[in-house]
Amino acid sequence: MSADTIESRRAWLLSERPASRMQARLGRAYVAWRRFSANRLAFLGLLIIISLLVIAALAGVLAPYSPTFGDLKGSRLLAPCAEHWFGTDDLGRDILSRILYGSRWTLYVVILVAVIAAPVGLLVGTVAGYAGGWIDAVLMRVTDIFLAFPKLILALAFVAALGPGIENAVLAIAITSWPPYARIARAETLTVRNSDYIKAVQLMGASPFRIVLRHIMPLCISSLIVRVTLDMAGIILTAAGLGFLGLGAQPPLPEWGTMIASGRRFVLDQWWVAGAPGFAILIVSLGFNLLGDGLRDALDPRSGDQ
Amino acid sequence: MSGRTLLDVDDLRVTFPTRTGLIEAVRGVSFSLGRERLGIVGESGSGKSQTGRAIMGLTPPQARISASKLAFDGVDLLAASPRERRALRGKRIAMILQDPKYSLDPVMSIGRQIVETLRTHEKVGKAEARDRALAMLEAVQIRDPARVFDLHPHEVSGGMGQRAMIAMMLIAGPEMMIADEPTSALDVTVQLDVLGILDRLVSERGMGLIFISHDLRLVSSFCDRVIVMFAGKVVEQLKASELSQAQHPYTRGLLNCMPRIGFERHPLPVLDRKAEWAA
Amino acid sequence: MSAVENGAGRGSARAAAFASSLGRFLVIAITTYLGLLAVTFFIGRVIPIDPVLAVLGDRAPANVVERTRREMGLDLPLIQQFYIYVTSALHGDFGTSVLTTNPVMTDIRRALPATTELATLGTLIGALFGVPLGVLAAVKRGSVIDQIVRVIGLVGYSVPIFWLGLLALVLFYAKLQWVAFPARLDVVYEYTFTPITGFYLLDSAMQGQWDVFHDAFRHIILPAALLGYFSLAYISRMTRSFMLNELTQEYIVAARAKGLSETRIIWGHALRNAAVPMVTVIALSYAGLLEGSVLTETVFSWPGIGLYITNSLQNADMNAVLGGTIVIGSVFIGINLLSDLLYRVLDPRTKVR
């Protein structure tokens, strides 16, 4: 591609008078991308998340040992060495392999929580914002009540009742994390509810259901994505905390929080058993936080300073 | 021009580096000021406010300022240290901002804000500072100074807030005042009150005044001389009394925008802006 | 004309505004607390298939099960059960702990000061360091200091607290021996020291037992510093953002035009304005630390409510878990509501209107 065509393509993307909806959309995406990629830390975050995805997909290929079966005789609690880069745990399992497989459980938790909590919040928020009146009042009061609760303690109590396990941990976290999404969706809905184009759709006889689904929800998506990304780190930390307390994933699953819990017994002598999985949690949470910050700055220039 | 020169500005330039290149807000402005009232007129973005802030030394840190001369009463402002400039601000050069709603500290009582200016520049006791602040509030025609002294900015009207602002800026007895759109944010009914107070204090104390405004009518009735700015440059400089003989088409355009009773004005004139005036 | 000149009638308007905002506040407070009770009721009575089994275990004889069922009111309709649940919770009656055989409230009363002492010290550390760091980062925006504060904050948001606690124990207790082992006091003092308020640092200082004070300090400093770090991460980030916002305001330009020094402008004007929302942030951070105590107390064997809850969890002691949840939840909600109220009281702008 010559410099000329790149230049003209850029001009097309940055055109102030886009000829089609597609051009406007691509142009906006291009501007957001430029702002995003100028932010080196956000780019680092993106790299971390992509690595996480790749590792999770290829854990079977990348991991040098089995994550669940170890050599109980010869390799218990080995310090990091050439064969076992991160050492081995009390059952002789290679910690590196367990961490690589553990990335799958981290992704599993994060995605499942997002898939449950975000649509619930979106639905509650858009319906409250569009309907207004007493529906709005009731829904928002419920949202605010949930927002005022201590999330971790509540999740703990939920898991205590539901019984320990990774699915119940996901459910408990999802139950406590939808309210902020509802608030955001409602705020966005209120800004567009009285706009002319919604009026136009109403005049054409669209049902409230269709308006909310087709014309309001899509507008809330981008701010919701930013918020969900920023919340990912919190979700990972809560899930790991539940795992640490023995309420999340159960051994022998190589979930990182659970791994820290089982490494806790030897932490004073073999600190790496608990150290390595915690470090993995730190890196992935950091990745989501950096990415979320960058996305927020790129998609919303107003909040760029904060 | 009356008396000796207070302020001498020659070829003042203010540039802001941005991601897309340099933006020149002020491009070679020159004028001088004695103990008189000078008006600077222009549209928003003409660089008039940045000129005022550059003289005060209040441009944001990333801005670059250059001038072949920028001197206040013989002090070279560009060579002065930040400490020296700070000592000038409030004490010898003061500034009034547009909207008292934003330019007064919302969580500090009006009295304390006035006292603060005084005690920054003069060694005075608390009781004396309070007395002088009360006297100053009276001088800006606030009827119940002792009560207003303890009020917070949100508890007073815009007109009263701007009077408090004037009191706060005049209490240390400056020789020069820059008023940046001091009445634009006020109700029309109190605009004249505030202007009257400003006018009286400036002439009583023999101060130099730079009156920055977008309102040519106001400036011409209030000032001795008028500078018209366009796109960062001075396009015309003339006596207020000779405004009707303005030569420059931009000034004429501004003048034509003023409504006059008894004249049919259809279609409404549109201000002409030609690129070559800015060149 | 001016707001000052028509002062008549403002007093009554102000009283009415106050009454209506008080009414709103009460509605919010009551519904939120009822919500908390409803959710814990749901968790304790509705989710388990048989709450009696959850309390007694599955090896209890049939007649005991039947008696307990009636004692717990489980034969009554749900709404009536909820009514009983709410009234007994309001009386501080959360049942008996299976693990300790004490009334849950007695256990909690014993554990609460430990949690409060830890969270208070943590917030103090966080605010003491976090506010100046945030101010510095905002003033020197884009500088090295700003970057460092940003990284400190980001890591604070991303690190698992229990993991950092474990590593800190390895370093400061096992390797360097700067701090004491995980507990609240050395065993020697546990039996000789009689607390008054339950805040050991305060109690020992009041009684002049400086050896106990020193020992208590050696035990609390590491968990408190850890909580302080999390609080610092949040507080410094919010302070920076509030300060950046204040520093662009016109009154800052006016303050410079008055000839004030930068120090005076930053600490005397900008921070005073930022202080109003900062109070809310510090209160929220305090509430967050109370909640975060569940993990920290577990790591540091700190005998507070968090450890009480996790110990009860491991023994399926639902009464104790729910009691602890309600107490921490109530304090959390209370702090949230109070900080909201405090905001209104502190900001002179909200007094009129």
Image (cartoon, rainbow, N blue to C red):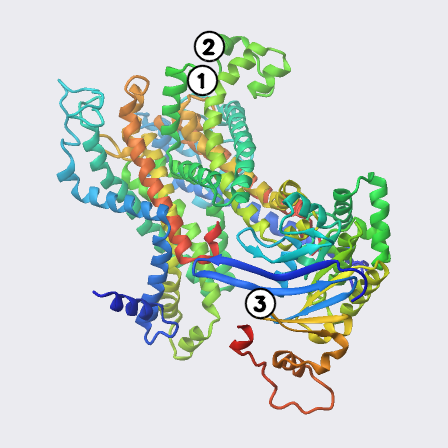
Direction from residue A85 to residue B267 in the image, left or right? right
Say which of C152 and A158 sits in front: C152
Q: Are marks 2 and 3 on the same chain?
A: no
Q: Can residue B114 be seen at all in this image of the molecule?
A: yes
Q: CA distance from mark 1 to mark 2?
A: 9 Å
Residue B16 at what x, y percent from top left? Answer: 52, 58
Q: Which residue is mark 1?
A: C183
Q: CA distance from mark 1 to mark 3?
A: 70 Å
Direction from residue A192 to residue A255 in the image, left or right? left
Q: Which residue is mark 2?
A: C187
Chain designation of label 2: C
Q: Secondary structure at mark 2?
A: helix
Q: Label 2 amino acid?
A: Val
Residue B88 lies, with reference to residue C308, above or below; the image says: below
Residue C259 at what x, y percent from top left? Answer: 70, 47
Q: Residues within 10 Å of mark 1 (few under 14, many from 20)?
A: some
Q: Residue at x 17, y 39 (%)?
A: A59
Q: Secondary structure at mark 3?
A: loop
Residues at discs 2 and 3 in contact (Cβ within 8 Å): no
Residues at discs 1 and 2 in contact (Cβ within 8 Å): yes
Q: Secondary structure at mark 1?
A: loop
Say which of C237 and A65 sits in front: C237
Say which of C62 and C84 sits in front: C84
Q: CA distance from mark 2 to mark 3?
A: 78 Å
Residue A95 at what x, y percent from top left? Answer: 21, 28
Q: Can residue C3 be seen at all in this image of the molecule?
A: no
Q: Residue at x 86, y 60 (%)?
A: B204
Q: Which residue is mark 3?
A: B232
